[in-house]
Amino acid sequence: MTTRPLVAVLSGAGISTDSGIPDYRGPQGLWRRDPEAQRLVEFEAYVSDPEIRRRSWQMRRANRTLLAEPNAAHRAITDLERSGVPVRVITQNVDGLHQAAGMPERKVLELHGTARSVVCVGCGVRSSMTEALARVEAGEADPACLVCGGILKSATVMFGERLDPEVLGAAMTVAKGCDLFLAVGTTLQVQPAASLVGLAVEHGARLIIVNAEETPYDELAAEVVREPIGTALPALLARVAGR
């Protein structure tokens, strides 16, 4: 029995722009349009400044991430996995759209956490972002943990926080063991996520980059695709699946 090659997909913000979620570092990215917005997701500022927390909760309230739907690119990855090809997704995104598109939870590694949950800085208890936002809607400017009264934050990795070492370790294992590594919609400027590309290539994987802008790893790629992700990725994955 022939073992089918393992496909690893590293996804960044560009894969979700067709779902209405803006990226951060692209030409129209949030950090370029409003550099001050980055302060709202800096851990030290968040835990030390109640005003930053209040502004952060209003930003989350206005954010449309929880209402977003998977697009053709997310669905194409799920279709590849359902075709019988072993697929693992390593995502820099916090939107949960890979899972919403049908990818099994155990096959998605969220390097930067998830915006669909909140976590208490004090006791570590997790709860639903939807429930926390309902409290904000009801008038709580800075909702506290209902268990210990501690500070609640999005269950995302803020600037100044370390990535979960277990998640990162699992991602490194996937990168080392895959046969094909796809970097989709990511500028490959954020470490240590971007280093997974080099790790995969060092261990013999074929690299394909699908991104509108140049990346620091383009020279390592066997193929670089600049076309829009929503059409380019489904066509590429159909080719991988042999369809």
Image (spheres, rainbow, N blue to C red):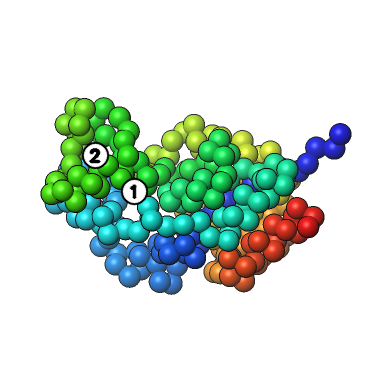
**CA gap, disc 1 and disc 2:** 16 Å
SS at badge 2: strand
Is 63 or 201 nearer to us in this picture?
Answer: 63
Residue 11, above or below 87 = below
203 to 16, vertically: above or below: above
- Which of the 4 quarters of the picture holds residue 32? bottom left
Frontmost residue, 196 versus 146: 146
Location of mark 1 (residue): 159
Is residue 219 visible in this depiction of the protein?
no
Rendered location of residue 139, percent (x, y): 13, 49
x, y percent for residue 67: 38, 56
Residue found at x 62% / y 71%: 227
Q: Which mark is residue 152?
A: 2
Q: Position of residue 116 (x, y in %)?
A: 37, 45
Asked whether, in this view, residue 22 is left or right of residue 108, the answer is: left
Residue drawn at 28 percent across, 53 percent down: 60
Dividing the image into 4 quarters, which one contains the C terminus? bottom right
Outermost residue to the right: 1
For the residue pair 231 and 212, the one nearer the viewer reads as: 231
Residue at x-position 79% and y-position 55%: 242
219 left or right, relative to 36: right
